[in-house]
């Protein structure tokens, strides 16, 4: 009997976030910035590895100091970086991230174009993708060619190899030419996913309705889905499957920086699903996995920066026991 596949492969962007040293100021007012590795798909891969899971990252970095640093950060955190390629003609992407006084974020990006946007289908390390139990991606890689074509091809390779497809659109309005194009392209691959996670902000953006009620969420449901999640920040998460649905509350913590909290949530949930795929058909198991994921997201929001804040399993279990 073949060994069960548990590898989570994340596809997309990895970049450097520059974060102000003080919260609650505009970028112009910030006295200084601290560099931090970022990019939602990379955060998800590291979230999986931090919990003891098998994770790999597929994407393109600049052949520069920052790109080499990011590849090393993947490896140092236990992520297989065999799917990373380097571009000698383009820089690694940068983002300046403002932390408002409430811990929420605003973004200003430097990508014109950055290396991640220039990944081609021919450069994909398909051997890495074919080993995936789950292939996870966002929507930023859909914005521009040639990366969009590479993204679509990677999804096809993963699906044909038997992977579950996991989609977190991770909306960044500032990166899209227009909001209409963002909505159209995000939804252009909607039906192909098995697992979809949206925030309440993304739910409103995609439906045009400012509500998290079930009838609104179900406008995004597709019969091909195995699981759809609507994250509600510190209020927890709503979930939907073919046969059952529910709400799982979060854990009360003092939020410092929400960067990476959603990535910690989906990464930890994917880790639980590859360990026991039957959770997708079992309400008790699924709610247990979502509680675990909520705890991971909550812990990540208590510290500055995404990757340094991603928890290990013992830290998560301690929070769950205290609650």
Image (cartoon, rainbow, N blue to C red):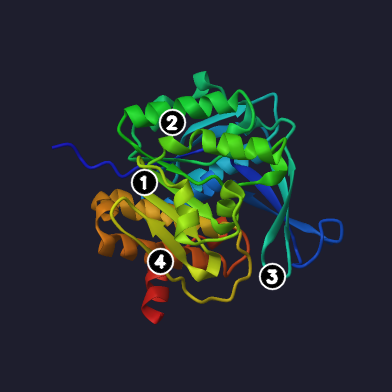
Q: Which residue is mark 4?
A: 247
Along the line of sight, the residue nearer the viewer: 267 or 229: 229
Answer with the quarter of the image where residue 114 lies: top right
Relative image position of residue 101 (x, y in whole percent): 73, 70
Relative image position of residue 95 (x, y in whole percent): 71, 46
Q: Single out the residue that lies furthest toward the left.
A: 1
The residue sitting at 38% across, 68% down in the picture is 314
Answer with the quarter of the image where residue 315 lies: bottom left
Q: Confirm whether residue 93 shows in the render.
A: no
Q: Which mark is residue 102?
A: 3
Q: Which residue is mark 2?
A: 155
Above-or-below relation of 1 to 259: above
How many neighbours does mark 2 have within 10 angstroms: few (below 14), some (14-19), or many (20 or more)?
A: many
Q: Which mark is residue 54?
A: 1
Which quadrant: the C terminus?
bottom left
Q: Is residue 30 left or right of residue 189?
A: right
Q: Confirm whether residue 149 shows in the render.
A: yes
Above-or-below relation of 219 to 261: above
Relative image position of residue 318 (x, y in whole percent): 39, 75
Q: Single out the residue that lies furthest toward the bottom.
A: 322
Above-or-below relation of 15 to 99: above
- The numbered mark, 2 or 4, whose residue comes first in the sequence reads 2
How many neighbours does mark 3 have within 10 angstroms: few (below 14), some (14-19), or many (20 or more)?
A: few
Relative image position of residue 255 (x, y in whole percent): 60, 72
Secondary structure of residue under mark 1: loop
């Amino acid at each position: 009997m073949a060994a069960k596949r548990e590898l989570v492969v994340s596809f997309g962007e990895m970049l450097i976030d520059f974060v102000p040293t003080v919260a609650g100021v505009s970028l112009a007012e910030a006295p200084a910035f601290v560099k931090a590795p970022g990019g939602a798909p990379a955060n998800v891969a590291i979230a999986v590895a931090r919990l003891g899971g098998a994770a790999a990252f597929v994407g393109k970095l600049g052949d520069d100091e920052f790109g080499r640093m990011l590849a090393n950060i993947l490896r140092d955190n236990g992520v297989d970086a065999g799917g990373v390629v380097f571009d000698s003609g383009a820089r690694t992407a940068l983002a300046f991230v403002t932390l408002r006084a409430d811990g929420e974020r605003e973004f200003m990006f430097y990508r014109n174009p950055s290396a991640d946007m220039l990944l081609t289908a021919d450069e994909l390390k398909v051997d890495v993708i074919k080993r995936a139990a789950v292939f996870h991606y966002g929507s930023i890689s859909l914005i521009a060619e040639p990366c969009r074509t590479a993204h679509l091809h990677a999804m096809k390779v993963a699906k044909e190899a038997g992977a579950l497809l996991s989609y977190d659109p991770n909306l960044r309005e500032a990166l899209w030419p227009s909001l209409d194009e963002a909505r159209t392209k995000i939804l252009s691959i909607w039906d192909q996913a098995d697992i979809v996670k949206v925030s309440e902000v993304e739910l409103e953006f995609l439906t045009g309705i400012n509500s998290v009620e079930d009838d609104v969420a179900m406008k995004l449901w597709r019969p091909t889905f195995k699981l759809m999640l609507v994250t509600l920040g510190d209020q927890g998460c709503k979930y939907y499957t073919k046969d059952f649905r529910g709400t799982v509350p979060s854990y009360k913590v003092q939020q410092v920086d929400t960067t990476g909290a959603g990535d910690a949530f989906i990464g930890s949930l994917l880790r639980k699903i590859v360990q026991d795929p039957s959770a997708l058909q079992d309400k008790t198991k699924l709610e247990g996995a979502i509680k675990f994921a909520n705890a991971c997201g909550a812990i990540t929001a208590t510290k500055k920066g995404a990757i340094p804040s991603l928890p290990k399993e013992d830290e998560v279990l301690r929070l769950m026991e205290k609650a």
